Structures are given as C-alpha cells and as structure tokens.
Image (cartoon, rainbow, N blue to C red):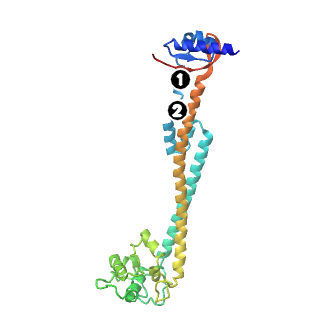
Amino acid sequence: MKSKTILWIILILFNYTFSNDKKLFTGNPSVDLFNNHTLLNSLPAQTQESDNNKLKSPFLAGGLSLLIPGTGEIYAGSYIKAGLFIAVETAAWIYALKYEKKGDDQTNFFQNYADGRTDLKPSWDLSEPDRYRTRWDVIRYYEWSYANKLIINPQGDYSEISNAIISNDITLPPWQRIDWESLNALERAIGKWYSHTLHHHGEQQYYELIGKYPQYNQGWFDAENPNFTYGDQISQAFKEYSKMRGLANDYYYKAKTAFTVVLINHVISAFDAYFTTRSYNSKLKFESIMKNQETIYGNIPVAFLNLSYNF
C-alpha cells in the first residue's frame, strides 16, 4: 500500500515538474496524472464566473448596517442576527423618545411653576402691592439684592449701578420690566456669594440658576427670612423646584443613554455585517471549489487547486 502511495506522489511530481501549464488537481489520480487537459476542457466555461457573481460586498453590508442596523446582516443572509440588531434598535428608539418626551413635559412643568402668577409673597416684600408677581420673581430678587448689597459686600463698588426697573406698568410680567444689563452689573458688583449673573428670562440657564444657587433664594414667593445670607435655610419652594428640575434632568439622562445605545448598535451592526459577509464569501468560495463535477469519467468529486509556475 505504501509503495503505491509513493509511486502516485512521484508520478504527480513528475507530471507537475515537466509542464508549463496551469495545473488543475481533482484528487482523482487517473484524472490528475493522465487526463488533466481533458478534464480542464470538459469543465463549463462559466463555472468560475458564476461563482464570483455570488460573492457579496462586505463594505456594502457594513454601510447598510451603519445606516439601519440589521440590513447588512439581511444582505449577508444572517437573519437571526439581523432580527437581534433590529430589535435593539427599535427598543432603544422607543425608550429614548419616551424619556425625551417625559423630559420635555417635566421641563414645561417646572418652568410654568416658576413663571406662574401668584398673589403670595414674603412679609418683607412691600413694594407695589398690586403688581404682577410670579412664584420666582426677578423684581423681588433685584429689590432685595439692591437693598442688602452693603450687608453682603460692604467693599463693593456700586458707583456705576443704575436702577434696573425700566417700566412702571405693574400689569406686565416682572421679566418685562427689568433691564438685564443693570441687574447683572449689580450682581457682579456685589460679588461674594453672588457667584453668578442671571441669564435672560426664557433661557435654559435662567431656569437652572434660580433653582440651583442660594443667591436666588430671595426671589421665591415663600422666602420669609429678610436677613437671608449664604448658608441659611433655603425656602421650601426653592427645594421643590430643584426636585422638579432634577427629575427632568433624570429623564433626559435616560433618553441620552438610550440614544448612545442606538449609536453603538449602528457601529456594532456595521462591523458585524462586514465580517459576516466576509465569512459568507469564504464559505461560498470553499463550496464552489469542493463539489461534484461532471467529467468524461462520470460525476466525480473535484477539488479545484490552481497552481502556476514559471522557469
């Protein structure tokens, strides 16, 4: 048995060495040693071309999944993974949009709370008894700050400070009666624990500051301590408002996390589609060169191995 195997190997090497042709080995000795040309000529001319036409583009698959996760996997024929990526994408978008809306609704709620009109006021607020007042009132904040500026910071330079109330129409909302540049100039002059300048009404920073820093405590309608200073107990409305704003931030954080999952899902799906398609092509090539082939000797298993050499 060994002698036959050695003889077969020697004959193959002899045939391989003294030929300048491209060799096509089938694994069948009678065909490989003596009838290679006949077999080669008997193969359908379109076999290799049709196999190549079945190959798929990994880059196209990756690009499809980068746009819509799962579509590249569908292109590559991996339907289970496609379903998983589509499911994650759908769930993440539903979750993100749900909490984005909850965040928007909660933001509207706490902003309307701060801007809501009320007749309630601290006992020390004696100015313009019938004017338009809100729960957080910029006129109240300004008037208290101006009255207590020398207590908060006796060394402050107030020589350039002008009156920030620019309208005597008490029917207007308080933010329409304030000159913001004059208000901010007063805040900067006071300094000390007046660490921020108030943004214009309606801006996101306006609603953040009034419920975050103690300097804005005296703008709230229930701030009863006329001698308030840094470190004193803040008003209950200040605390409740901060919780409202914090809840909105929590909702937005959850939405942001879900949007991050969406982005990651796109990237992972793109990479997976790329490598899944490459794997598909490799399998297709393997199957295309290991198959039964009709020859002059009948239907035999053929392994196509292309070898080329030059002397």
User: Could you tell me which residue is drawn at 46 percent across and 72 percent down?
Assistant: 208
Check the image and name the residue furthest to the right: 1
Residue position marked by numbered label 1 in the rendering: 50
Q: Position of residue 115 (x, y in %)?
A: 46, 75
Q: Which residue position holds label 2?
A: 56
The answer to which image quadrant residue 158 occupies is bottom left
* Residue nearest the observer in this picture, 187 or 193: 193
Quadrant housing residue 305: top right
Q: Nearer the viewer, residue 162 or 154?
A: 154
| Residue 42 in view, yes or no | no
Type of amino acid at the residue the image marks with label 1: Ser
Three-letter amino acid code of the residue under disc 2: Lys
| C-alpha distance separating marks 2 and 1 | 13 Å
**Quarter of the image where the N terminus is located:** top right
> What secondary structure is marked by label 2?
loop
Q: Position of residue 2 (x, y in %)?
A: 69, 16
Image location (x, y in percent) of residue 103: 53, 64
At mark 1, the secondary structure is: helix
Q: Measuring 55% from the left and 36% from the top, which residue is drawn there? A: 277
